[in-house]
Image (cartoon, helix red, strand yellow):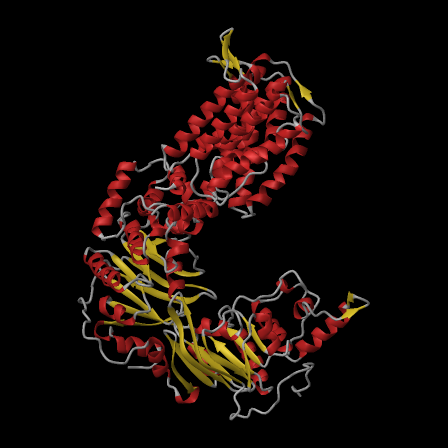
């Protein structure tokens, strides 16, 4: 077995290698990177920070993975975060209980996902254009909800979702882990995963085999909307306010990046939720590392681009082919 | 007078039969060692409509692509008006006077009709497009085709037939001496075809040589002066239409002498209630309303030339396209077939002709491909466990002798025949009552071919109802209890009993009474 087939047959190798390398780099510039301490029943440390800060994008990437696996894309998740945050902030200030606040925010996400799903699956607009509509309009909707101002709030139970802790971990990390677990069960313990992959690889064959392509497509966009709403509530709770203009800004691109780094092809098909979350953590670990190192944040984007390039390179079929050829030449 | 043309370089108006307009001599072309064209001669005279016929893979499109510079021939020469040419691309072919109009019209739907006609050569004024002059030119040009249209309208607002005529007008105006029409009538109705033919007759009178590729034999006899038939990359014959009876033409195309095959085997006439029945089932512009019934344990063969409506029939029955007339019933109960899901729920299965695009999911494993339809029918919540999936896959791999190292291999690593068997397995796993097989033996090596036929016979013995579409007439004659014959998008006959033989099938396709 040569290098190329090794990469092909071991899923997750490039991702875990990249994560380890980024961690190692962080450790070199900041020797306390792996230090974790327990203070007041809660863990603290840079590693915990990476998980905590990375949680919103990781949550987005879970929904995004499923959408991309059907050969779609969801550009609206950042805007949906803003809508959900605005909904939560407005409801909590109106005096509603946490349950109502969360239900309202999730319902907003669900409605957004349904809209995207119907545009893609029923009206049959190309996903990139269909979700662009809500990406643009969503911030307007969020502003209408907040009536154009940054709505701050001071409800302790809502704030706890962003900055509280559970089982010793920051609550966003627990929510992320829970959502990943639920999503994994939903797609892998049922036939959803296979059906999604089939639709993404060959929609026509799938339809002729009796798969309900339309419902399946709507479902993944709804799931993406729900994930975005959860991420939106976390971000709003963390800053104790809903900023319709800036909440989740450009995070759709980070989420797409996380999915791609996680090895799911933009052409649809085989996907891995766990590796997408790893992808999100790689991105966040780089951000954290650059902050810790004291480099100017300007480096952030360039370093990110380089690492992404290095992760994607061994996944490129053309590169693999060359490696395979080189391997054959060397082997007698 | 028709001769009043805006054409600058219209050909001479002397249909001198002795002087060929175009000669292709000894053209050969191989792809990956397989000869697509083998020493093909083709001669076109000015002012004639020359039909180029042949079944799938006969070499028609390869020949046309060599002529229009898409491919370069490996061997042979092309002579246009006495001068040897070798077009390197379609642009050069057009400049030499060889214009082509494809079935899928290559026009820009959002540009105006006039802009489409003069794209890339718009009349200019002070460096800007002179729209008024362009539109005036367009109107004058179209007047020659008896077309009075608003040339400023976007192309998309016109019917396919008009678009087709505009494409022809554009090709002829680009100084075409040779006009190639690749299935121009495939999406036209009878009236539109007549309009097109009037135009072709007018172009003939101008001395333009027309190469006409079609699957509709009626149209060949209505318009063509001469017919060249290709089969397996060779010219089978080139004859004047008047001297070539239909029956002989069909035999030439199918490559069958009218002798009875020895190995035919007929099961007795099946009695009893049909499992599936269709009355007056059809869809406008796709297939004429037809009646069809298949009983349990019966194989109904569907025969007809390419483009006669065979696949269209299957798609309608399986709910991929929805019928706009007639009714369908399963076991005596009226049913609605609005989607493949409906059909599958009723116990239907369909192995499409387009195996790669409509059948297999290439990157999924053999196992996943086999269980896909069964899983889809169970719904996403009732997942087949990996163990169950493996069991089903292994059972069918053994039963159908699917040659694969293991069930986890991506299906697109398998040969065509084994992919076909895996597709069959996908449906057999759902235990269907009625199975539609569209060209089950296409692109399959001889060994697998025979296995699939044996399989068809075994399935039918087990009580399944089968509808098998095939262009292999001998195959159909060998295993069918009844044969439905299609011609020009209509079901034109049902053969039963002793009539199920190669000769009668070919004669029915060719529209001659036995």
- Hey, which residue is sitting farthest top in the picture? A40
Residue A212 in which image quadrant? top left
In the image, is residue B440 above or below residue B171?
above
Q: Residue at x 36, y 77 (%)?
A: B253
Q: Residue at x 52, y 87 (%)?
A: B45
Q: Is residue B489 visible?
A: no
- Residue A215 spot, x, y in % from top left: 45, 41
Residue A138 in which image quadrant? top right
- Hey, which residue is sitting farthest right in the picture? B126
- Residue B490 spot, x, y in % from top left: 40, 70
Q: Nearer the viewer, residue B438 or B279?
A: B438
Residue B95 in which image quadrant? bottom right
- Residue B255 spot, x, y in % from top left: 32, 77
- Residue B151 spot, x, y in % from top left: 69, 69
Where, quadrant-wise, is the N terminus of chain A in this rendering? top left
In the image, is residue B458 above or below residue A185?
below
Q: Nearer the viewer, residue A99 or B257?
A: B257
Q: Residue at x 26, y 58 (%)?
A: B465
Q: Is residue A321 visible?
A: yes
């Amino acid at each position: 077995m040569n290098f190329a087939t090794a990469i092909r047959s071991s899923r997750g190798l490039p991702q875990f290698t990249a994560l380890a390398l980024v961690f190692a780099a962080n450790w070199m510039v900041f020797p306390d990177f792996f230090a974790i301490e327990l203070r007041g029943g809660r863990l603290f440390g840079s590693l915990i920070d990476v998980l905590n800060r990375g949680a919103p994008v990781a949550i987005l990437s879970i929904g995004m993975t499923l959408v991309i696996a059907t050969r779609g894309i969801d550009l609206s998740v950042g805007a949906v975060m803003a809508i959900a945050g605005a909904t939560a902030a407005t409801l909590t200030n109106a005096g509603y209980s946490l349950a109502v606040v969360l239900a309202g925010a999730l319902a907003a996400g669900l409605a957004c996902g349904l809209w995207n799903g119907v545009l893609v699956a029923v009206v049959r607009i190309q996903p990139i254009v269909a979700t662009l509509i809500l990406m643009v309009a969503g911030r307007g909707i969020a502003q209408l909800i907040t009536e154009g101002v940054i709505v701050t709030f001071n409800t302790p139970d809502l704030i706890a979702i962003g900055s509280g802790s559970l089982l010793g971990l920051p609550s966003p990390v627990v929510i992320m882990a829970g959502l990943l677990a639920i999503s994994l069960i939903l797609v892998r313990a049922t036939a959803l995963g296979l059906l999604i992959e089939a639709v993404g690889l060959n929609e026509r064959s799938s339809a002729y085999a009796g798969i309900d392509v339309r419902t399946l497509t709507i479902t993944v966009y709804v799931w993406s909307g729900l994930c975005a709403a959860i991420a939106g509530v976390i971000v709003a709770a963390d800053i104790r306010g809903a900023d319709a203009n800036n909440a989740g800004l450009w995070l759709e691109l980070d989420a797409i990046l996380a999915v791609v780094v996680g090895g799911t092809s933009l052409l649809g098909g085989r996907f891995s939720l766990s590796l997408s979350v790893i992808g999100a953590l790689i991105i966040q670990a780089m951000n954290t590392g650059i902050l810790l190192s004291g480099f100017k944040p300007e480096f952030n984007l360039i370093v990110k681009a380089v690492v992404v390039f290095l992760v994607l390179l061994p996944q490129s079929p053309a590169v693999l082919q060359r490696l395979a050829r080189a391997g054959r030449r060397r082997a007698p | 007078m028709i001769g009043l043309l805006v054409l600058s370089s219209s050909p001479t108006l002397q249909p001198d039969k002795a002087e060929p307009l175009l000669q292709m001599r000894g053209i050969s072309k191989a792809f990956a060692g397989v000869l697509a064209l083998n020493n093909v001669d083709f001669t076109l005279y000015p002012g004639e409509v020359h039909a180029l016929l042949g079944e799938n893979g006969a070499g028609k499109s390869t020949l046309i692509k060599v002529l229009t510079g898409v491919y370069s021939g490996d061997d042979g020469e092309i002579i246009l008006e006495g001068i040897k040419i070798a077009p390197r691309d379609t642009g050069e072919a057009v400049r030499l006077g060889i214009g082509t109009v494809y079935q899928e019209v290559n026009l820009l739907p959002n540009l105006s009709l006039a802009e489409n006609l003069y794209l890339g050569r718009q009349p200019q004024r002070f460096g800007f497009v002179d729209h008024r002059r362009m539109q005036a030119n367009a109107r004058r040009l179209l007047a020659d085709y008896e077309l009075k249209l608003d040339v400023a309208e976007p192309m998309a607002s016109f019917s396919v037939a008009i678009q087709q005529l505009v494409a022809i007008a554009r090709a002829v105006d680009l100084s075409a001496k040779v006009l190639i029409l690749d299935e121009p009538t495939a999406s036209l109705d009878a009236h539109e075809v007549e309009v097109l033919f009037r135009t072709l007759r007018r172009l003939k009178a101008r001395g333009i040589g027309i190469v006409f590729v079609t699957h509709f034999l009626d149209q060949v006899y209505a318009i063509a002066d001469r017919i060249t038939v290709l089969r397996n990359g060779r010219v089978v014959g080139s004859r004047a239409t008047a001297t070539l009876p239909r029956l002989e033409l069909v035999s030439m195309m199918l490559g069958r002498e009218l002798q009875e095959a020895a190995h035919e085997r007929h099961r007795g006439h099946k009695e009893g209630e049909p499992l599936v029945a269709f009355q007056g089932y059809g869809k406008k512009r796709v297939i004429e309303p037809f009646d069809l019934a298949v009983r349990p344990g019966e194989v109904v063969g569907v025969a007809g030339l390419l483009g006669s409506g065979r696949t269209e029939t299957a798609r309608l029955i399986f709910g991929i396209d929805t019928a706009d007339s007639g009714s369908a019933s399963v076991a005596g109960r009226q049913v609605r077939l609005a989607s493949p899901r409906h059909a599958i729920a009723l116990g239907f299965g369909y192995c499409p002709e387009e195996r790669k695009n409509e059948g297999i999911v290439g990157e999924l494993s053999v196992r996943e491909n086999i269980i896909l339809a069964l899983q889809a029918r169970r719904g996403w919540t009732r997942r087949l466990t990996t163990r169950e999936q493996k069991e089903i896959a292994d059972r069918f791999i053994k039963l159908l002798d699917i040659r694969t190292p293991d069930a986890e291999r991506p299906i697109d690593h398998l040969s065509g025949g084994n992919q076909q068997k895996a597709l069959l397995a996908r449906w057999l796993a759902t235990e269907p009552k009625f199975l539609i097989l569209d060209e089950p033996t296409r692109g399959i090596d001889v060994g697998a071919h025979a296995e699939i036929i044996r399989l068809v016979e075994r399935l039918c013995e087990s009580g399944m109802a089968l509808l098998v579409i095939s262009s292999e007439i001998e195959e159909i004659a060998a295993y069918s209890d009844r044969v439905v014959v299609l011609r020009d998008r209509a079901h034109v006959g049902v053969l039963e009993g002793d009539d199920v033989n190669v000769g009668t099938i070919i004669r029915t396709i060719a529209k001659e009474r036995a």
